[in-house]
Image (cartoon, rainbow, N blue to C red):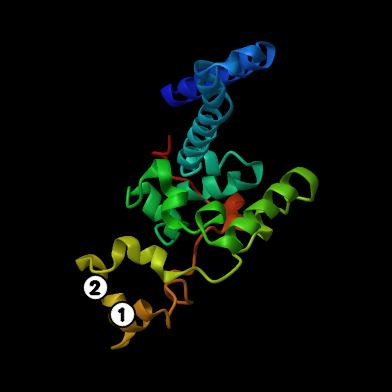
Amino acid sequence: MSRVVIVEIAFVAATALLALLVAFRAELTRVRGGKVLAFVALFILPVLAVWGGFSEHMERAQSTRFCLSCHVMEDYGRSLYIDDPSYVPARHFQNNFVPRDRACYTCHTDYTMFGGVKSKMRGVRHIWVYYLGTVPKPEDIKLYHPYNNRECFHCHLGARRYEEASEHHKQPDMLAKAASGKLSCMSSNCHDIIHDVGTLKDATFWKGAP
């Protein structure tokens, strides 16, 4: 159990105890000190507890472990260990091009709660489907909209390895088109093999996988 979680539990416990004290000893609020105690118990501590819990959850939600904790995401986690450099996620994960403990978040920074209002609403829908609906098969999960080059450019834009790669100069204006979003990094004949979870049964896996 992390130190943050322990502090959060302590906040909740203190809030509950003080709230009970105020509830059963209402006469305390007749004096100034009691009113301050009631204000702290009923407003300040609950706000701090909620904020601490929210911050802790947001931090955990960025971890690869959290993303793969859903059963339907397990195959996507396995795809990170495919022994084939043409699989973009596997290549980045295995070579530490992205931090392994935040691999999913690094490449999907606008996903559900981390995106705009529409993304957050889709996140609520995911919760509904997970608990009350029919969860789709992993191979049937698709992105809501084409993958944004911005996620690639967080790391690659301006990098010599990216700028000087011969395959990025098959056409004179490839880099400019990619930077403007007119050409997707995931286009056919570019980096079009991503999380191909439907072929995992035929795949070979990295022997150095933990």
Q: Position of residue 80 (x, y in %)?
A: 47, 49
Q: Position of residue 169 (x, y in %)?
A: 28, 81
Q: Amino acid at mark 1?
A: Leu
Query: Mark 1 Cα within 10 Å, few/some/many (few <14, many 20+)?
Result: some
- Residue hosting label 2: 163
Q: Quadrant of the C terminus?
A: top left
Q: Nearer the viewer, residue 208 or 61?
A: 61
Query: Mark 2 Cα within 10 Å, few/some/many (few <14, many 20+)?
Result: some
Q: CA distance from mark 1 to mark 2?
A: 8 Å
Q: Residue at x 34, y 66 (%)?
A: 153
Do the CB atoms of the residues marked 1 and 2 lie less than 8 Å apart? yes
Residue 93 shown left or right of residue 117 in the figure? left
Vertical order, 45 against 192 (above or below): above
Q: Position of residue 128 (x, y in %)?
A: 74, 49
- Work out whether residue 125 can be spotted: yes
Q: Residue at x 79, y 50 (%)?
A: 133
Residue 41 shown left or right of residue 184 in the figure? right
* Circle nearer the N terminus (1, 2): 2
- Residue hosting label 1: 175
Q: Residue furthest bottom?
A: 172
Q: Amino acid at mark 2?
A: Glu
- Work out whether residue 1 can be spotted: no
Tag 1, which secondary structure? helix
